[in-house]
Amino acid sequence: MKRKLEITRKLEFMAVSSHPKKLGNLLENSVAILNLPASFHCDKGCPGCVMQKDDAILKEREGALPRWKIFSLISEFSEKFGTKFITINGRGGPLHPMVKGETLEKIQYAEARGISSYLFTSGDYLEPETCELLAALGSNVMISLLGNGFLDKDFFSGREYQGTPKTIAGNVRMLISAFRDSRNQPEEGLTRLGMNYVVSRRDLKKPARLRELKKAANDNGIFFVCNVDFEPDLNPFRRARLLRLAKECSDFNLSHSTSVKGICQMGAGSSLTIAPDGSIYHCPYMYEGSDGNITTVSEEQLLRIAARYITQEQYACIKRKTKAQKKR
């Protein structure tokens, strides 16, 4: 049974014009998602990781925002922009020991104020207490399979691994168990766990492996979404095949986990990203060419930036420059 990610369902509800309180399309009248990526810290070095390709990402560690400023931004965006979610993604491992404390404090601070959280992890640095806390708080968690190519359908039937894969597999199983056993459960038909798979040439040769992995994930109550590399394949025929397979193996044919009306709301729609050093972007995977810094822009400037972001409808994905197929 396919289950939709809870955050996606809530975003869809916000987009419904006939909102019960007659507030109209809230995605076009608020910054629904505030992306607050942590400083880049990751020991994996996965091939194809966009953050491994430029030293610019490391410069964000200089002049990092203090935690009190981050907390005040969460409150400010909730009050002034109607923000309902924070995400922590786009910069390495958010549970890396160097940033884990900050990450969990962001989530707890937001949850205490009725703001849901969405965390991305590749399975590194997970501990039982962390998994149980995330489940208890009702966080949505996306498990990145980039760099975890060893995971297949047999993962869900208890296959044993060796070396680093053994650690990662154990961590992911621990996370799944914590969410399954938690008293805090989403509504029927929804889930708070997802898996993100980047389709590659290998999958074109053996598509059955990907289809079987997706089915196994769905059978275990996990939302499954596929996309393609940020750098498009130079062969147009192969690129088209990759896109078709990604769409086929994505639950509900969504190209992004937060896709609503054809647009990734987290990076191209009703969202705003504040990088660790305060730089302002639309998408959390951007790290150059900012629209200013949160510590120096005026309130009027911030309003203009936010208005431009939330009314963007040209691209489904800002980072990939994928054209939107539908208007919001």
Image: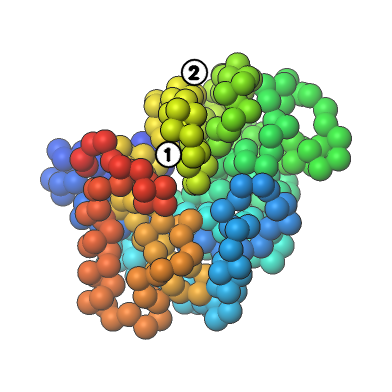
Q: Check disc 2: other Cα within 10 Å, few if <14, some if 14-19, many if 20+.
A: few
Which residue corresponds to the image point at 41% horizontal and 68% vertical from the top-left?
289
Which residue corresponds to the image point at 58% horizontal and 33% vertical from the top-left?
200
Residue with the mark numbered 2: 1
Q: Is residue 252 above or below residue 313?
A: above
Q: Check disc 1: other Cα within 10 Å, few if <14, some if 14-19, many if 20+.
A: many
Which residue corresponds to the image point at 42% horizontal and 39% vertical from the top-left?
256
Rendered image quadrant of residue 311: bottom left
Q: CA distance from mark 1 to mark 2?
A: 19 Å
Q: Amino acid at mark 1?
A: His
Whether residue 63 can be seen here = yes
Residue with the mark numbered 1: 256
Whether residue 85 can be seen here = no
**Residue most toward the front?**
235
Q: Amino acid at mark 2?
A: Met
**Label 1 SS:** loop
Side of 261 relative to 102 (left or right): left
Q: Is residue 266 above or below residue 168?
A: below
Residue 155 pos. (x, y %): 72, 26
Q: Is residue 78 above or below residue 26?
A: below
- Quadrant that contains the C terminus: top left
Side of 155 relative to 135 (left or right): right
Which residue corresponds to the image point at 26% horizontal and 36% vertical from the top-left?
325
Rendered image quadrant of residue 38: bottom right
Side of 34 relative to 156 (left or right): left
Residue 223 pos. (x, y %): 50, 30
Task: Name the one closer to the observer, 275 or 23.
Answer: 275
Q: Nearer the viewer, mark 1 or mark 2?
A: 1
**Label 2 SS:** loop
Task: Name the one closer to the observer, 69 or 98.
Answer: 98
